[in-house]
Image (spheres, rainbow, N blue to C red):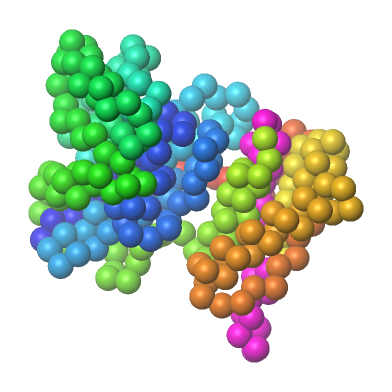
Amino acid sequence: MKSGFVAVIGKANAGKSTLINVLVGEKVSIVSPKPQTTRDRILGVLTEKDYQIVFVDTPGIYKARNALTDMMMRTTKKSAESVDFILYVLDGHDGVDETEFEEIKKYKELGIPMAIAYTKIDIMPKENIPLDMAKFSDSGVDLDVFPVSARKGQNVKNLKSFLVEKLPEGDKIFTQDIVSDKSERFMISEIMREKILLKFDQEIPHGIAIVINEFRLNENGVYEVNLDIVCEKAGHKSILIGKRGAAIKEVSSFARADMEKFLGRKVFLTTYVKVKEGWRDRPNLLKEYGYEEYKED
């Protein structure tokens, strides 16, 4: 059978996590229209009769501004260096420019087989696609390019078949029923963070961490989840809570519904908002909140 690791690389908000979720057929990464949605190296595992693809979802590429984002960029780079194939995801809706080509060429120089997923073709003018394809030809980037829409499922099957073809022969890396390397506890914290990303604007969502204090299945079949939402400023705490607690109640309700869908059981959710100034630049807090740099075994 065919098996191997495929690193999914690209700029922030290019649609990497959405594409992986569609390829795997399960939600293994949270999604939002904001940068910094993916902070960790997350594996999504697609297993079929004659192949297994382990997709490596990586943090988006952008300029590091603090210890957390600096660690995220190093994680992306290390992930790309240790796989069988690189799939560079490019936001077709935003178009192709020279900075994108520079990033693509940088990863191409690693000498690892590579292709490009040109995403979001369902929300862009169709006449832009051939114009961008011509730019690839002019740039000297000699790679297979797959225009896709993860949301609509357009050309995703062809991309999947291409990736399988490019994988080496080998045994399964994970057992049949594994779809991600992350725990339920991790996914519960990510679902909470996703809902905050979707509800709140500007810097607030990027300055929050989710800390799970309690995650257990009670005898009555209900999951009890107790968590802290950690933000960086007292003013952010006020916004997160909202007038008479309305904002935190609303976002918690949305999160609980998704947690129940993910776990397949009822969830009793308790949330607290706490302030830890500058936590993204404090290594001890980064480690405490579960953000540790990826290191190869």
- Please report the residue visible at 29 percent of the width from the left and 52 percent of the height from the top: 23
What x and y, as percent, mark residue 242? Answer: 83, 47
Above or below for 104 versus 148: above
Specify the quadrant of the image occupied by residue 291: top right
**Residue 205 is a magenta residue:** yes
- Please report the residue visible at 51 percent of the width from the left and 75 percent of the height from the top: 264
Q: How many marks?
A: 0
- Please report the residue visible at 24 percent of the width from the left and 34 percent of the height from the top: 147
Most foreground residue, 218 or 248:
248
Question: Left or right: where does residue 78 sit relative to residue 292?
Answer: left
- Please report the residue visible at 35 percent of the width from the left and 29 percent of the height from the top: 124
**Range shown magenta:** 202-225
Q: Which residue is outermost to the bottom?
A: 219
Above or below for 192 versus 175: above
What x and y, as percent, mark residue 155? Answer: 21, 44
Question: Left or right: where does residue 130 sit relative to residue 282?
Answer: left
Specify the quadrant of the image occupied by residue 120: top left
Q: Quadrant of the N terminus?
A: bottom left
Most foreground residue, 241 or 154:
154
Most foreground residue, 41 or 121:
121
What x and y, as percent, mark residue 249? Answer: 76, 58
**Residue 231 is a magenta residue:** no
Q: Which residue is outermost to the right?
A: 244
For residue 222, say whether it is visible: yes
Specify the quadrant of the image occupied by residue 280: top right
What x and y, as percent, mark residue 34? Answer: 55, 35
For residue 56, say whether it is visible: no
